[in-house]
Image: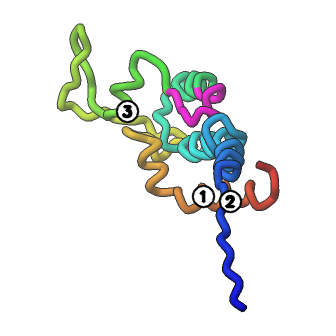
Amino acid sequence: MPFKATVTFDTKGLQGYLDGRFGVGSDAQYEWSKIVFNGSEKYIPFLTGDFRNRSIAASEPLFAQGELLYPGPYAQYLWHGFAMEGTPRKVTDRPLQYTKKEGHGLAGAQWTDRAANDNIPAWEAEMQELIDSGRI
């Protein structure tokens, strides 16, 4: 005589576990944000180091939330790569010239986007190593 059974899975608990382990506010989110921030280091505009240092101080508390914060009144024009002038500030069509100091040879506009474009596979491998090793 055939036996018929119906099996159902309640994945709510699994989703909660995954959200807790990898979602916003998790150690995994913190580590991923740190990987992206550190991996973008040589792309960040660097003249005196002040912008970079203030960005570290502003971003680190937000890593677990998945946010990177580049503060300062000039962050917007650095990001877009065009000089601003006037009051209120308006973007011009004059491109900025970024200083290529040691360690920041790729400094320029939209630094995290360019860094991600160049480094996502390496960043993913670094994150996977943290997961596989049980560190997160």
State whether the magenta stretch is mostly helix, strand or loop: helix
Horizontally, residue 104 falls left or right of residue 128, namely left
Q: Amino acid at mark 2?
A: Gln
Q: Quadrant of residue 34?
A: top right
Q: Nearer the viewer, mark 3 or mark 2?
A: 2
In this figure, what is the number of numbered marks? 3
> Where is residue 83 drawn, in percent x and y?
27, 26
At 58% from the left and 47% from the top, the residue drawn is: 39
> Where is residue 8 drawn, in percent x and y?
65, 64
Q: CA distance from mark 1 to mark 2?
A: 6 Å
Q: Is residue 62 magenta?
A: yes
Residue at the spot of label 1: 124
Q: Helix or strand or loop: what does disc 2 sit on?
A: helix
At 52% from the left and 27% from the top, the residue drawn is: 69
Residue closest to the far front: 1
Q: Amino acid at mark 1?
A: Glu
Residue closest to the far bottom: 1
Residue at the spot of label 2: 128
Q: Earlier in the sequence, mark 3 or mark 2?
A: 3
> For the magenta stretch, what is the residue range?
59-69
